[in-house]
Image (cartoon, rainbow, N blue to C red):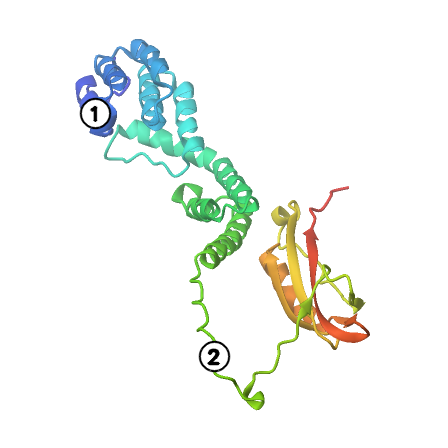
Amino acid sequence: MSAFPFVSTMALSALVLLSFSPDALAAPDLASVRELYAAASYEEALAALKDVESTDNIEVVEQYRALCLLGLGRSADAEQALERIVMRRPLYVVSATDVSPRLVTLFHEVRRRSLPTATREVYTRAKTSYDRNDHKAAARQFKDVLTLVSDPDLAGQNQTLAELKQLAEGFMALSEAALAAAVAPVAPPPPAPVTAPVPEVAKAPSVARVYTTADSDVVAPQAIKRAMPGWRPPNPLVAQQSFHGVLEVVINEQGLVERAGMSRASFPSYDADLLTATKEWRFRPATRNGEPVKFHLAFEVALLASREE
């Protein structure tokens, strides 16, 4: 008796053939599997599939495997094959016009069950790419996370995925900003200086030098008021993670923060609070030969994961 009572074996085989691209079926190993499946030789088809595990089109392999297992009445094993598809390519979907309704229904059941875990794994890979400064990969992966959390198969999932969406949006914005900065056009070189003598009154005022810790003859500024904003993670998922950044400031001759910026972002909302806080910072200015001078400082920013007691 056919495993699909609503359609004949021959009709089902013809329907399955439509679901795979000509290139995939052109490979001798998959063509052999197709012929075995069409002949309802499910055990032989499964055995043949063991020889095509290394193919790049693993989704086609697992889809054939699931069809053969369903033909043998092994629904639980078919679900495992479909779950492997979801975990490897969470965005992969089976079209209702390509394969049997039974396989489509089973695939969506498996996908709804597996997609939350798969989505979190995509986020973890994206965060790893971001931490390695691979912003191109990170932006693409965070975009995949946002696509997944809006997927119909995740409708009705718990609040954790909403928190994941918030994180992915923030880090995708940071990744895209880093990519934009990397490809920003380089300013053209300044025009050649005029050779004619310039009257003294027409000369531009000299720009004060900004000293650093590399200048051994300069006494570094001393903090008088340098309050850091409190770190309040927006949700429990963020609280379980650590974030690290670098704040750079220029302190002027009056001991005020003249410029501030994040050379490495920590967490978007905290970075904004930190830059606002620097406007209230006060220092004893750096001095060189007893005279106040501008000075550049860099501060490590560490937002550490909370530890449950």
Residue 137, x across and y down, in percent: 46, 44
Sequence-wise first label, 1 or 2: 1
Are the residues at dot 1 and dot 2 in contact (C-beta closer than 8 Å)?
no
Say above or below: 4 vs 233.
above
Q: CA distance from mark 1 to mark 2?
A: 79 Å
Q: Do we see residue 35 in this rendering?
A: yes
At 51% across and 36% down in the image, what residue appears? Answer: 117
Q: Which residue carries the number 1 mark?
A: 17
Tell me the number on the disc at residue 34: none
**138 or 102: nearer the eye?**
138
**131 or 118: nearer the eye?**
131
Q: Do we see residue 219 in this rendering?
A: no
Residue 123, x across and y down, in percent: 51, 42
The three-letter amino acid code for the residue at tag 2 is: Thr
Which image quarter: residue 226? Answer: bottom right
Give the class, few, some or many, for how many residues have Cα within 10 Å of label 1's Cα (few <14, many ≥20): some
Which type of secondary structure does the marked residue at label 1 adopt?
Answer: helix
At 68% across and 52% down in the image, what residue appears? Answer: 303
- Whether residue 127 sits left or right of residue 19 in the image: it is right
The three-letter amino acid code for the residue at tag 1 is: Leu
Which type of secondary structure does the marked residue at label 2 adopt?
Answer: loop
- Whether residue 283 sits left or right of residue 296 in the image: it is right
- Whether residue 33 sits left or right of residue 107 in the image: it is left
Residue 271, x across and y down, in percent: 62, 61
Quadrant for the C terminus, please.
top right
Q: Which residue carries the number 2 mark?
A: 195
Quadrant for the N terminus, please.
top left
At 41% across and 41% down in the image, what residue appears? Answer: 153
- Whether residue 182 sits left or right of residue 95 in the image: it is right
Say above or below: 83 vs 287.
above
Which image quarter: residue 128? Answer: top right
Say above or below: 159 vs 291.
above
